[in-house]
Image (cartoon, helix red, strand yellow):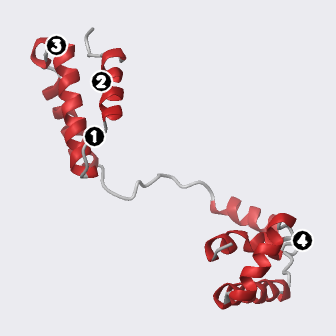
Amino acid sequence: MNCRSVRKHISDYLDDKLPANLMSDFQEHVLNCSKCASEISEMRSTIAGLRSLAVQRCPANLWPEVRSAIQSMGAPSTVSVGFPRRFLIAPAVAVAIAVLLALPVRKSEIGSPRQLAFSEYRHYLIEHMRVQKQPFVDSDVIFAATELDTAPIMIDGD
């Protein structure tokens, strides 16, 4: 067992829920690793400190007092958004313009479904090469080609 495995099982160990088949390896590692042993010791002292805290009970009449305080406040007459409405107009106009600019695009301007698929595949290859810094494996190319051939092409207006 290594430090990473020990850290993963510390809670189970401290709660006496560590499976028996892991217990001997766990204890052997802790005996030989001062870092893990000190981490377990710190956890034990933290747990002991938390258990020593006094439990505070709420007074029995707390909820009726809270309820009456809320009811005495009354409902607000207006709800404030926190910023003027004029700040909402600019994004709404920008979205409307973007939608209007996108509408005139016709199917003939997009190209055939095959050209669209090739464009998507080309973009995928370029991104893969940029991120991975290693060439495609033949199985990747076969998989991508199969996906492109069998995937339905969806174009608005079809």
Identify the residue at image location x=25%, y=49%: 134
Mark 4 to mark 1: distance in Å? 69 Å
Mark nearer the N terminus (1 vs 3): 3
Q: Residue lying furthest front in this view?
A: 138
Mark nearer the N terminus (4 vs 1): 4
> Can residue 152 be seen here?
no
Mark nearer the N terminus (2 vs 1): 1
Q: Quadrant of residue 98?
A: top left
User: Which residue bears the numbered disc 3?
Assistant: 112
* Rendered location of residue 49, percent (x, y): 79, 89
Provide the secondary structure element on which disc 2 rests.
Answer: helix
Q: Quadrant of residue 44?
A: bottom right
Quick one: label 3, few (<14), some, or many (20+) residues within 10 Å?
few
Amino acid at dot 3: Ser
User: Which residue bears the numbered disc 1?
Assistant: 136
The numbered mark at residue 81 is none
- Compared to 101, does 58 lie above or below? below
Q: Which mark is in front, 4 or 3? A: 3
Mark 2 to mark 1: distance in Å? 12 Å
User: Which residue bears the numbered disc 4?
Assistant: 60
Identify the residue at image location x=72%, y=80%: 29
Mark nearer the N terminus (4 vs 3): 4
